[in-house]
């Protein structure tokens, strides 16, 4: 092989067979041995340059189909098993760039780009995914198909690839929000996977998580038509009454049910019309709430999950209840059916203390939305539930004894009682002996002083049991704080218990007064709600800290890049080439004389070890949205 090197002060010498980059001292720094892939790269650049010049001279709205179709097909044909990694990486950029000018090749363009998304090389896949939104910029008909593909890729475990999938998907929402939501919600409703044997539940879970992210970042783009699409798709999910034999899967379905209702409640059509929202909810209640005689069989596993689903339903419905200032018939059913079965959940074969606690907590959370008539009808039932929680006499009040009270339940019943008492003070006399004259015909002014004495005795028992325990707890928390890092979780738990006891003492003392005070939400926050808010604030604070850098936040990063590109000199477009290096469009199309000196950095000796493409993608994917 001839090797005509030139000795001079130039750092680069070349011949028809080799390219050599020399140091200023004359030593060989890099020797490039041409191979077959060089011709592939040259052909790609040559045809891309032809297309670039043609686009500059093209009239608005015209296509290049007739005259330059062959040039574009050269780029499309570079997507094959035999082509080099570098050729495929360039194809990832060139195919989307000129896709809009060849409408007759639309289907082939999408299929070739999807072939690149299925490559075994991660760098190729990421570049291909990055180019998908560009295919849709001038042809919105492609958005649904591309969005369907990206929704299948949301479950990727590779962090960089998963981030690129999300970034590309978010760009689609800017192009066509309605079609993007439609595709994403269909993936949630009927999850499909790209690999045989993958769990569809994982695909649904990842799609649901992304759905939450989109709603936060793209809520301004949601118009009336898009809202109708969201409502239509989520309605089908809300009507899903199937349960799973796997408790973990069943719990996830309950959480997703709550999430979907929460999402719907934030839509403009429901946010502006509370009555419309409550009417919508009435048709999607997991239980027949109109019939309070229809008791649930808590020995039945499916009935238990229906009750859990109903609790999730109530949490999502709180906003609507607050707007219309009524929680009928949901509070009625919860107290009549749920609270009446607490004894079954506290002991015996159907014991489920967590579910029992959720019942009394949601009762307390929605109690403030009762109408006067609902409060009057259920005040006595709630009061009796509270009295059951406190024994008539305590065994001892010595320091060695532990309180035999369920403080969490007592807090819920006390709080609910306070809310109902504010709504219907006239019903208190016949319930617990607290005589308040309202002037209404329904007032019962008879003598119920014995009921008041019984109430005072129970409240004293409660306070004398709670106060010593609270003192011990404060001492214990103080000791835990000596090592905050080690005891962080325990401190959080004990703080909630302390808040619970503080609330009980405050509400108890308010009822013991000669003229009782009834404490509302504006004065006292239930301990579990306060803890929930703290956890949410900490999560938000941690999220903001982790995303504080504008380059880490994908949305801000994209905005920053757009601002940078729009302000660049002459508005020139740049393309990524090789290992993240960027070339100006004039720079990489020019300098053809130095093309042989490029460092391809693709380890050509190991090229034969690449995973086989196999016609179905190097990773065995097969998208379900091919044309």
Image (spheres, rainbow, N blue to C red):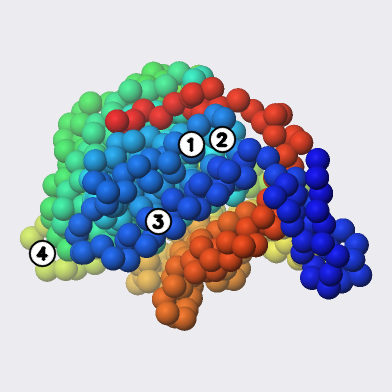
Is 495 situated left or right of 117 in this image?
Answer: right
Are circles 2 and 1 on residues that touch, CB within 8 Å?
Answer: yes
Nearest to N terminus: mark 4 or mark 2 = 2
Nearest to N terminus: mark 2 or mark 3 = 3
Residue wearing tag 3: 50
Find residue 440 and name its label.
Answer: 4
Give percent across and percent down for residue 146. 35, 42
Residue wearing tag 2: 83
Q: Nearer the viewer, mark 4 or mark 3?
A: 3
Q: Nearer the viewer, mark 3 or mark 1?
A: 3
Find residue 79 and name its label.
Answer: 1
Measure how far apart labels 4 and 2 are at the Cα level: 88 Å
Measure how far apart labels 1 and 4 are at the Cα level: 83 Å
Secondary element at image label 4? loop
Residue occupying the point 91% across, 70% down: 25
* Position of the N terminus by quadrant: top right
Q: Which residue appears farthest toward the left when viewing the image? A: 441
């Amino acid at each position: 092989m001839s090797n005509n090197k030139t000795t001079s002060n130039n750092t680069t010498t070349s011949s028809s067979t080799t390219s050599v980059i020399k140091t200023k001292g004359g030593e060989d720094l890099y020797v490039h041995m041409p191979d077959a892939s060089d011709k592939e790269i040259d052909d790609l650049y040559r045809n891309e340059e032809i297309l670039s010049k043609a686009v500059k001279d093209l009239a608005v709205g015209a296509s290049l189909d007739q005259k330059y179709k062959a040039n574009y097909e050269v780029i499309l044909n570079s997507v094959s098993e035999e082509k080099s990694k570098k050729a495929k990486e360039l194809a990832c950029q060139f195919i989307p760039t000129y896709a809009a000018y060849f409408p007759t090749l639309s289907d082939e363009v999408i299929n070739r780009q999807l072939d690149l998304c299925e490559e075994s090389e991660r760098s190729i896949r990421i570049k291909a995914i990055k180019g998908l939104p560009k295919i849709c910029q001038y042809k919105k008909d492609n958005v649904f198909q591309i969005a369907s593909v990206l929704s299948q890729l949301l479950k990727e475990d590779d962090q960089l690839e998963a981030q690129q999938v999300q970034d590309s998907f978010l760009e689609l929402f800017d192009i066509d929000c309605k079609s993007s939501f439609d595709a994403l919600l269909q993936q949630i409703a009927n999850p499909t996977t790209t690999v045989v044997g993958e769990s569809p539940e994982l695909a649904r879970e990842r799609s649901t998580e992304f759905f939450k992210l989109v709603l936060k970042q793209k809520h301004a783009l949601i118009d009336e038509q898009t809202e109708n699409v969201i409502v239509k798709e989520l309605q089908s999910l809300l009507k899903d009454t199937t349960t799973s034999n796997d408790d973990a899967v069943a719990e996830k379905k309950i959480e997703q049910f709550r999430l979907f209702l929460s999402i719907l409640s934030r839509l403009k059509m429901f946010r502006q019309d509370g009555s419309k929202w409550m009417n919508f909810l009435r048709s999607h209640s997991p239980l027949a709430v109109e019939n309070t005689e229809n008791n649930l069989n808590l020995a039945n596993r499916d009935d238990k999950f229906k009750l859990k689903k109903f609790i999730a339903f109530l949490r999502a419905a709180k906003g609507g209840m607050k707007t219309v200032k009524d929680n009928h018939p949901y509070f009625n059913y919860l107290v009549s059916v749920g609270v009446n079965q607490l004894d079954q959940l506290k002991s015996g074969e159907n014991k489920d203390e967590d579910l029992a606690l959720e019942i009394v907590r949601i009762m307390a959370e929605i109690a403030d939305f009762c109408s006067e008539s609902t409060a009057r009808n259920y005040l006595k039932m709630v009061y009796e539930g509270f009295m059951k929680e406190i024994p008539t006499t305590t065994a001892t009040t010595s320091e060695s004894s532990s309180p035999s009270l369920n403080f969490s339940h007592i807090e819920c019943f006390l709080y609910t009682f306070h809310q109902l008492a504010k709504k219907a003070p006239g019903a208190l006399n016949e319930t617990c002996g607290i005589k308040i004259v309202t002037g209404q015909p329904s007032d019962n002014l008879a003598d119920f002083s014995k009921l008041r004495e019984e109430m005072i005795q129970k409240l004293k028992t409660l306070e004398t049991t709670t106060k010593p325990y609270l003192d011990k707890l404060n001492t214990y928390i103080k000791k835990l704080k000596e090592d905050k890092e080690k005891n962080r979780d325990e401190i959080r738990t004990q703080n909630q218990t302390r808040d619970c006891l503080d609330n009980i003492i405050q509400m108890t003392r308010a009822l013991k007064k000669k003229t009782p005070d009834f404490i509302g939400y504006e004065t006292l926050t239930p301990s579990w709600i306060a803890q929930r808010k703290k956890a949410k604030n900490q999560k938000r604070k941690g999220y903001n800290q982790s995303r504080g850098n504008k380059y880490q936040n994908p949305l801000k990063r994209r905005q920053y890049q757009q601002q940078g590109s729009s302000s660049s000199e002459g508005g020139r477009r740049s393309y990524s080439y090789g290992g993240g290096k960027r070339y100006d469009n004039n720079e990489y199309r020019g300098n053809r004389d130095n093309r042989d000196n490029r460092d391809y950095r693709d380890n050509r000796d190991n090229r034969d070890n690449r995973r086989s493409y196999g016609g179905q993608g190097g990773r065995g994917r097969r998208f379900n949205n091919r044309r």
